Amino acid sequence: MSLFHLFLVAIIQGITEFLPVSSSGHLILLPNLTGLQDQGQTIDVAVHVGTLLAVVLYFYRDVGMAISGLPRLITGKADTPQSRLALLLILATIPVVIVGLILNLTGLDDAMRSIKVIGWTMLLFGLLLYWVDQRGPSQKTMTEWNIRDAITLGFWQAIALIPGTSRSGITITGARKLGYTRHDSAKIAMLMSIPTIAASGLLLGAKVMADADAQIARDASIAAGLSFVTALIALSLMMRLLKSVSFTPYVIYRVFLGLVLLWIAYS
């Protein structure tokens, strides 16, 4: 792959992974709308690793807290803030792993990779985010995150396996619906992304490991590095803006892009 192509893929993944606009949808659209070749699963794994490292670094205190709680959780106890956070993140990840395996084994994940599907999900889930964000209460904070809410958000997150939905967007929508503040909804969604991205990365990584060579490894390293930097910047900006700005700007972008894609798909 050319350096320009790697740069495009990494920038798109880095910017869109944590913003509620769907990274997978944009990566699918790139070859469809530009005529460039599909970047392939190896590069997909690489840019996901880059964004994973970015969110781990940004929320390193919370990540460290969850990791430190794992030993106690393994003993069957979730009676400390650390072990409780670890438990909640695990429970929130189970639905997306199960649904993801089903879609992968049945081939439905590839069947949904179309401009028409992405157009509808961009539009409809964007409008849903706007409606929930404007009407939902903003009373709960992350300290009130509980087992029931973690499982509920896990099912919301599983919906994001439909291309164009946006993992962060649908999880934020679910958290806002449950009454969490905008900032804490985004924080919960970002923390939930860590085991989810790690799980999907391991699944894809197992598939492409046998086909890797020196050239692919070089391309993957460049893509991972670029997506890491871009994702860290995008994540920092979004979390800061949420203190004073709603999700409406992202909704406007989703609706506009969704309408354009539907026009292309049906014309």
Image (cartoon, rainbow, N blue to C red):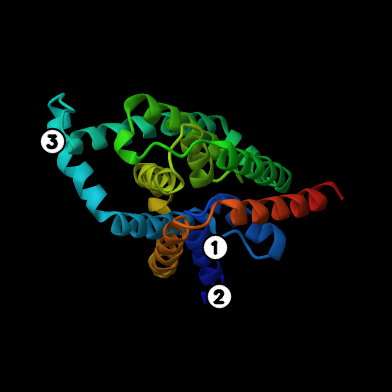
Mark closest to the chain's N terminus, 3 or 2: 2
What residue is shown at x 68% (from left), y 40% (from top)? Answer: 124
Q: Does dot 1 land on a helix, a strand or a loop?
A: helix
Look at mark 1 in the image and give the residue it sits on: 12
Q: CA distance from mark 3 to mark 1?
A: 37 Å
Q: CA distance from mark 1 to mark 2?
A: 12 Å
Q: Is 52 placed left or right of 71 in the picture?
A: right
Type of amino acid at the residue the image marks with label 1: Ile
Using the image, tell me which numbered label, if any, was put on residue 71.
3
Using the image, tell me which numbered label, if any, was put on residue 4.
2
- In this rendered view, identify the residue nearer to me: 231 or 32: 231
Type of amino acid at the residue the image marks with label 3: Pro
Q: CA distance from mark 3 to mark 2?
A: 44 Å
Using the image, tell me which numbered label, if any, was put on residue 76.
none
Q: Is 42 placed left or right of 113 in the picture?
A: left
- In this rendered view, identify the residue nearer to me: 37 or 177: 177
Q: Is 15 placed left or right of 263 in the picture?
A: left
What residue is shown at x 46% (from left), y 37% (from top)? Answer: 175
Mark closest to the chain's N terminus, 3 or 1: 1
Say if mark 3 contacts mark 1, CB within 8 Å. Answer: no
Pinpoint residue 263: horizontal percent, then vertical percent: 82, 51
Q: Is residue 163 above or below residue 5?
A: above
- Tell me the crowding category of disc 3: few under 14, some 14 to 19, or many 20 or more residues within 10 angstroms, Cα based: some
What residue is shown at x 60% (from left), y 33% (from top)? Answer: 108
